[in-house]
Amino acid sequence: MFEESIKELEKIVEKLERGDVGLEESLDLFEKGIKLSKACNDMLDKAEKKVSVLINGEKQDFIAEEE
């Protein structure tokens, strides 16, 4: 899901950078790009939290083993 969203976002950016689309289509693409960007950011935030929980869980397990 994340990789597909990034690829779609890259295509949108390329279209907008070329400048060969009309104003209405540009606005539609921009809106879609913003939504994709937010969705990707949410996915990254969730992944970061999961990694943090896993790392902190391992640290807690290690500390419990030492005691």
Image (tube, grey):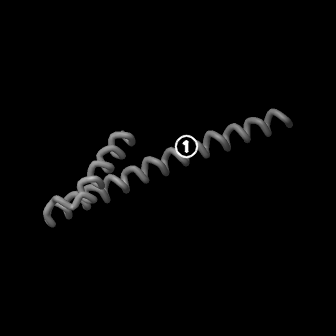
- Residue depicted at 38% across the width and 40% down the height: 3
- Residue depicted at 58% across the width and 42% down the height: 51
Q: Is residue 20 above or below residue 52?
A: below
Residue at the top extreme, as displayed: 65
Question: Foreground: 2 or 56?
Answer: 2
Q: For mark 1, what is the residue?
A: 50
Q: Is residue 59 above or below residue 35?
A: above
Rendered image quadrant of residue 17: bottom left
Amino acid carrying label 1: it is Lys
Question: Foreground: 67 or 55?
Answer: 55
Q: What x and y, as percent, mark residue 18? A: 24, 57
Instruction: Identify the secondary structure beneath mark 1.
Output: helix
- Residue depicted at 86% across the width and 37% down the height: 67
Q: Is residue 51 left or right of residue 21?
A: right
Residue at the bottom extreme, as displayed: 23
Q: How many marks?
A: 1
Q: Is residue 58 left or right of residue 5?
A: right
Q: Quadrant of the N terminus?
A: top left
Question: Foreground: 27 or 22?
Answer: 22
Q: Is residue 41 left or right of residue 22?
A: right
Rendered image quadrant of residue 13: bottom left
Circle 1 crowding by C-alpha within 10 Å: few under 14, some 14–19, many from 20? few
- Residue depicted at 54% across the width and 47% down the height: 48
Q: Is residue 51 left or right of residue 59?
A: left
Q: What x and y, as percent, mark residue 38? A: 37, 56
Q: What x and y, as percent, mark residue 57? A: 67, 40
